[in-house]
Amino acid sequence: MNTKKIYKQESKKKTPKWFYLVIILLPILLLIILEISLRFFNYGNDYKEWIDLTERFEILNPDIANKYFSNIENIPFSSESFLLKTKPENSFRVISLGGSSGAGYPYQNSGSFTKYVRKALEFSFPEKKIEVANISMAAINSYTILDLLPEILEKKPDLILMYLGHNEYYGVLGAASNQSFASSIFLTNLIIKLKEFRITQLLTNFLTSASQIITTHEKISDGTLMSQNTKKKLIGLNSPLFNKGLEQFESNLSDILELCSDKNVPVIIGTLVSNLRDLKPFNNVDDGKNPKADLIFEKAQQALVNNDLQKADSLFRDAKDLDGLRFRAPEIFNSVINNLAVKYNCEIAKIDSFINSQSKFGIVGNDLMIDHLHPNLKGYQLFGKQFYKKIINSNKVALGKSSLDSYSEIEKLVEENYNFTKYDSTIAAFRVKLLKNDWPFFH
């Protein structure tokens, strides 16, 4: 048999199937071995969502924000997120989700609206064990809430409260955040999930270190989380970046509400409120398409002087939407909230209209806000009142009849037992900074 014939016979032999199987499985096996090794040597972070606080209580992992923030020295955490490990039978469990306004910034748990909700429910339903856990954290947005939600729903809440939307641009992973690592909503959510693996953390840390060597960036520690997290980008109204933030909010909020709906957990979502009257816009955007924010703000002030309140309110809202530094959610975000609440059969707490109705001239200002978007203690109390009223009047919430005959009785009991109106002297420092338009101080 000559050499050519042998070669032809050998070439006709098929490669065995197991060979292709090995080719496919070998890299997967190596990745699994690497992942196990990294975990064995305790490399990276364990992003366990809930950890033990005591024998009876658990709390949201204080280090969980490391999953979303990078190159930030002081990450946020939730101090009001504790829950009983075993949910009592005769209980009513509320979990509140949001950003810094949801957390009660700058008063935190001493002034958050969930404090009012909890006490009002306790007075109204003394026979029930009331739990109100607040998962809100500074500088987070819909990406973080969507990621945390599946395990939150495993805690079997009877109700979800939500005040979310101001941080979609500069909050972590937001459309204009320096913490974003993907241009697409799908990829961002995928990478968040993949960061639970130590291999992903290893790769992320390598890329971050390489980037720091090239750009000589140091870990950011100065300023508030929002000032650390922003790329300082100005965002024009209806610009591509503006629309990206809007799309991000609408997509993630839709997924959030769909998850709650699938688990039959009722949701009350609050519309967003901002300081319209007393603090001018941060920055103008000279795009040749829209008027300057500060000029519209001046027209709004003049309309207020002329007692044309309806025109003033409209112009103040226009000035906010034209503000190039988007710490405040634009008006269209409330339209998104209303539309999605209807789609998923959620209750809406009309925080925006209620807070404005309680403000001087019917336009919210410094009487209820400490800065461009965070309420003062009285403002947070009004938030709590509005959410509580929506809870007891909702036919979607299984609470039964209140033991008290009137809402005024509940208000009186809550205010007698908890002083929500004590004014914090440190707020004066906030206003001094803000009036100087010192935006990096802003949180």
Image (tube, rainbow, N blue to C red):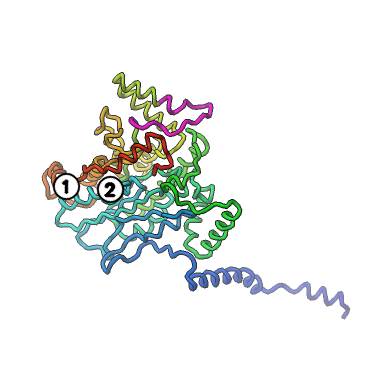
Amino acid carrying label 2: it is: Ser
Q: Residue at x 52, y 29 (%)?
A: 286
Judge by depth and name the residue closer to the eye, 116 or 222: 222
Q: Residue at x 44, y 55 (%)?
A: 73
Location of mark 1 (residue): 414
Q: Residue furthest left?
A: 405
Which label number is shown at residue 280? none
Q: Residue at x 59, y 51 (%)?
A: 215
Label 2: few (<14), some or many (≥20) within 10 Å?
Answer: many
Instruction: Report how far apart the C-alphas of labels 1 and 2 lie in the structure.
Output: 14 Å
Q: Which one is earlier in the sequence, the residue at label 1 or at label 2?
A: 2
Disc 2 secondary structure class:
loop
Q: Is residue 294 magenta?
A: yes
Q: Is residue 192 magenta?
A: no
Per the picture, the main secondary structure of the magenta-coloured stretch is loop
Quadrant in the rendering for residue 363? top left
Which label number is shown at residue 112? 2
